[in-house]
Image (cartoon, rainbow, N blue to C red):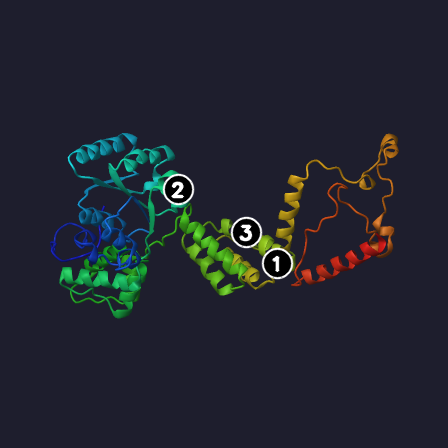
């Protein structure tokens, strides 16, 4: 696997990819991750105190995880072994562990770098524990997935999780400068096109250097590309968005919270990011319906009607016209009055339903279709509300052993302002007639 990013001391030409030729020789040459490698960075402090333990590197691709693992081994004089969970099984790991044990007997420890460690199953992850505990290996696992969900708690408890950040535009710019120094020529790009290329990299250093290679290969002598021509040449890099992984959950969380926070502009942005990343519009339609129920609720009952209608419109129109119907629902939800009154009431009622056992309804609201049931008091004393003043009898409908409960407490927003008045009115009548 190619590493990142430094030109000095390496061949300036050859068949190897540019990203491989520009990999750093020391940690000081790594671009980005200042929170880990800066003077007060976590890894810097570990190296100063010679307290390097097993690590989990968590972050997007092209941010230097493999590079830094290799350089940590150099800095600490550990033998560097690398494997990938994609291509390795338990038998392969046993061979690595045996080699590390033999190396340890000779007086040298091993840093084992495992790429895509989240792809190992639980049993495979457990196989690392004994050799971590006895010092045979220092494990450095790399993952693009949230370790809290993908890795064993036992493995996590024996490791420090280091979060890697996408490279900033300034960092990507530094890499392009190094590439130009190594190639001894400038990128044939107008200034605005250079900015576009940097954004296309999407925080991925390896991608930035690959895009630079594409540009050099495509350019004729003395040709300079503008932004439009650049996008024709290199096409558009697919956004980092895995519909089954963290990118999916991060973006849907951003969309949901933007709607809840009544920010239609941010909500539209995250909605479009998900569509652009290949998300299924029907998944988004279902999530919008959920938002209508959870976060707007009865403050605007029409929100549920709107979201169901936009789903139906998408199914009828398809893409791209149907996506506009979904976008309309995003705006509607974000600008609607907000309430979780129904959601909170449902949760509270469900807690009581689960904890109160099999309590029977009070007899006065039970039907009595047989003579025996009438003799048992079923239906006795029931008041038909339509015959009562104001259409409200005020009788109790809760189980006697539970007593009257209050679950629904609507805020005075939107349609629930009227519901609040009704509930207060009925509460007053209930007390008067009780």
N-terminal of the pair, mark 3 or mark 2, is: 2
N-terminal of the pair, mark 1 or mark 3, is: 3
- Circle 3: element type: helix
- Circle 1: element type: loop
Tag on residue 229?
none
- Foreground residue among 77 and 117: 77
Residue under the image location 30 percent in, 36 percent down: 133
Residue 367 placement (x, y as % from top left): 82, 38
Q: Answer few, some or many: residues within 10 Å of disc 1's Cα (few below 14, many 20 plus, some between 14 and 19).
A: many
Q: How far apart are marks 1 and 2 (CA)?
A: 34 Å
Q: Do the residues labelled 3 and 2 touch (CB within 8 Å)?
A: no
Tag on residue 339?
1
Relative side of 33 to 351, left or right: left
Residue under the image location 68 percent in, 36 percent down: 357
Tag on residue 150?
2
Quadrant holding the N terminus: top left
Q: Are marks 1 and 3 in contact (CB under 8 Å)?
A: no
- Circle 2: element type: helix
Residue 205 placement (x, y as % from top left): 26, 56
- Foreground residue among 212 and 50: 50
Does residue 83 sit above or below 265 in this rendering? Answer: above
Q: Distance between the residues labelled 3 and 2?
A: 38 Å
Residue under the image location 74 percent in, 48 percent down: 404
Residue at the farthest bottom position: 191
Of the two numbered discs 1 and 3 in the rendering, the one whose residue sits closer to the viewer: 1
- Foreground residue among 321 and 155: 155
Q: Mark 3 points at which residue?
A: 316
Of the two numbered discs 3 and 2 in the rendering, the one whose residue sits closer to the viewer: 2
Relative side of 316 to 212, left or right: right
């Amino acid at each position: 696997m190619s590493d990142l990013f430094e030109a000095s001391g390496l061949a300036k030409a050859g068949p190897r990819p540019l990203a491989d030729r520009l990999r750093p020789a020391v940690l000081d040459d790594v671009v980005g991750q200042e929170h880990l490698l800066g003077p007060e960075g976590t890894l810097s402090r570990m190296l100063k105190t010679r307290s390097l333990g097993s690590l989990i590197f968590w972050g997007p691709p092209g941010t230097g995880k493999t590079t830094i693992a290799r350089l940590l081994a150099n800095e600490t004089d550990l033998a560097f072994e690398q494997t990938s969970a994609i291509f390795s099984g338990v038998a392969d790991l046993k061979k690595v562990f045996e080699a590390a044990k033999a190396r340890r007997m000779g007086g040298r420890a091993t840093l084992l770098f495992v790429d895509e460690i989240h792809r190992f199953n639980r049993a495979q992850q457990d196989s690392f524990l004994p050799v971590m505990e006895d010092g045979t290996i220092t494990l450095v696992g790399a993952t693009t997935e949230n370790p809290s969900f993908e890795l064993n708690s036992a493995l996590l408890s024996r490791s420090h999780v280091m979060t890697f950040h996408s490279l900033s535009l300034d960092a990507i710019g530094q890499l392009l400068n190094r590439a130009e120094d190594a190639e001894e020529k400038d990128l044939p790009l107008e200034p605005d096109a250079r900015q576009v290329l940097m954004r296309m990299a999407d925080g991925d250093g390896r991608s930035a250097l690959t895009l630079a290679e594409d540009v050099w290969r495509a350019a004729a002598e003395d040709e300079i590309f503008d932004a439009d021509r650049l996008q024709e040449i290199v096409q558009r890099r697919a956004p980092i968005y895995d519909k089954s992984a963290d990118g999916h959950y991060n973006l849907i969380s951003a969309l949901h919270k933007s709607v809840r926070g009544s920010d239609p502009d941010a909500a539209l942005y995250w909605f479009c990011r998900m569509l652009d990343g290949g998300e299924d519009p029907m998944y988004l339609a279902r999530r919008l319906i959920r938002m209508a129920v959870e976060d707007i609720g009865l403050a605007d009952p029409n929100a549920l009607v709107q979201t169901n209608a936009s789903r139906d419109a998408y199914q009828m129109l398809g893409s791209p016209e149907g996506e506009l119907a979904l976008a309309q629902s995003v705006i509607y939800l974000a600008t609607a009055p907000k309430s979780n009154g129904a959601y909170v009431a449902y949760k509270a009622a469900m807690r009581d339903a689960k904890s109160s056992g099999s309590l029977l309804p009070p007899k006065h609201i039970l039907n009595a279709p047989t003579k025996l049931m009438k003799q048992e008091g079923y239906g006795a004393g029931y008041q038909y509300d339509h015959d009562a003043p104001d259409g409200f009898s005020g009788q109790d409908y809760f189980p006697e052993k539970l007593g009257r409960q209050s679950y629904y407490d609507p805020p005075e927003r939107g349609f629930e302002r009227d519901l609040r008045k009704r509930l207060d009115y009925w509460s007053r009548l209930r007390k008067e007639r009780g």
